[in-house]
Image: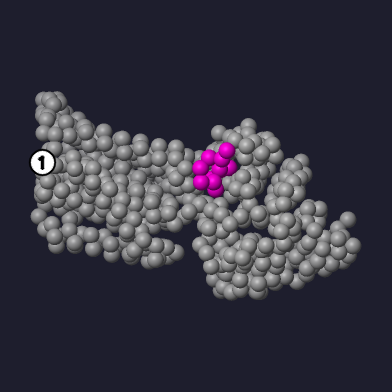
Amino acid sequence: MPELVVILAINGLIWGLIIALIALGLSIIFGLLDIVNVAHGDFFMVGTVLAWTVISYTGNFWLAFLIVPLIGMLLGCAVERLVIKPIENSPALSIVACFGLSLILQETVRATFGATPKRILDPIGITIPLLGLNYQIYRLFAAAVAIAAIVAFFLFLHKTKFGTWMRAVRQDRETAIALGLPSDRIFLVTFGLGTSMAMLGGVVAAPITSVEFRLGLDVLPLCFMAVIIGGMGNLPGTAAAAVLLAFIEGIITSFTEPTTARIISLVIMSVVLLVRPEGIFARRRT
Amino acid sequence: MLRLENLHAHYGKSHILQGVNLRIEDGEAVALLGRNGVGKTTTLRTIMGLTPPSGGAITFANVRLDQIPAYKIAGLGLGYVPQGRRIFSSLNVFDNLCLGLPGTPDAARLDEIFEHFPVLKERLNQEGGTLSGGEQQMLAIARCLIMQPKLLLLDEPTEGIMPKLVATLRNEIRAANKKGISILLVEQNFRIALALCTRVYIMEKGVISYEGTANELRKNPDIAHRYLGVAIS
């Protein structure tokens, strides 16, 4: 039993890193475009489905790993231009549009891919003994990819001109526009990048979860909770909260049902909202 | 160089600009004065495309600003120093300074800025939010000047600034004007406006109600008193 708890805790941690990657995508889209993208979880789901599709045609997981995030970037850019931009000054409409997008993505996948959950084989297929169990190396690889992607994301935000522009628009869109920052292009790339992060999360998670059209519904609440607990607009806080939440859910799942674990997460979020509405990792605002 | 013709703007149902006419020639320094809430800030925001006009035309160097996306306006040579400075508090001073440039500026351009604003050089790696009000104001002006604008729009640059720094800011604005940059200054501090500008517009309830030279205003203190409720001494 204690071994199982440790394993589930490690699984939770790895899952948390993947959630952190997805939640960061959600958070920058929210922070820059003022859009609560309720379809974000479905982009994650589409990532897993595309991974399954690429593998079923080519038999090569690594090809999926390379091209699905690129497809995510293109898909995100297309959605920004066709769905988001035409209604950019109406937050209420954008929620309706994203909800519609969510249904379209889910139903398209159900109509083409089918409603039956499918599994992807472990692409590495090697296990290591861990506390008397055989642990998949792939899970460690997934964690490493998530960490690398998160680090790359922060480096991009802080070390490149475009990243600096994104941070500026996030803080004060009007002044950024008055200084001539190409807001059009920044919104486009942000939505593309955010979507790409969700879909990269999807490919990476595909071999350790089941692939089905409702997968986004499970991931989205966790992402939102991470954004809220980490402090709205606080990106490192969001990442930390995602890892923490999934880790806690992982441990709790070893004692009880996943549903109960989710209830406990929601209770944690409610308590955080009551005690620290600005999020547990909120910095002093200047 | 800049021409506003019968410019109207609304915030919701309130009619803020009700037909503003204003022009600025090359190299001119012009003040836009008026009591609180008459539409001075809205005039500047409308020029920069941040508040869409509901009528009229804005022409800058033969380009209709009201017909292009807001983010393209700065690139035509307009620098905007907004009210309250609006420095990016989580970006460091260097990133704030160079934000509007496509890449990093060459050393000569940076040196020229530091010559005028030496305090910024000392604080390059500090977050914008940690600067004092006066330093933030210098940064807000410097981040426009580094883009080598043709016209600088300044919204109450001396508001809430230590008196000692007000003189510095005034000198730097004058220096920019001497270099040929036109100025449109919205200012509550009447004396600074008269000291910097050669021509003055006074706004009342969304329209220009007085237009004249700074000299005329100096000679006729009753004008300032009537329109602005201030006494010049």
Residue A15 placement: quadrant: top left
x 57%, y 69%: residue: B53
Identify the element where label 1 is drawn. loop
Can the viewer see residue A211 in this picture?
A: no
Residue B36 picture location, percent across and down? 70, 63
> Along the horizontal axis of the image, is B76 left or right of A230?
right
Residue B56 picture location, percent across and down? 61, 73
x 48%, y 47%: residue: A165
Q: Does the magenta stretch include residue B103?
A: yes
Main secondary structure type of the part rendered in magenta = loop
Can the viewer see residue A3 in this picture?
A: yes
x 13%, y 57%: residue: A113
Part of the protein shown in magenta: B96-106
Residue A241 picture location, percent across and down? 34, 40
Q: In front: A265, or B214?
A: B214
Q: In front: A66, or B129?
A: A66
Count of numbered circles on the image: 1
Residue A198 picture location, percent across and down? 28, 48
> Along the horizontal axis of the image, is A181 left or right of A144?
right
Q: In front: A140, or A7?
A: A140
Up/down of A206 relative to B151, above or below: above
> Along the horizontal axis of the image, is B189 left or right of B38?
right
Q: In front: A177, or A40?
A: A177
Residue matched to label 1: A121
Q: In which quarter of the image is the N terminus of chain A?
A: top left
Q: Does the magenta stretch include residue B200?
A: no
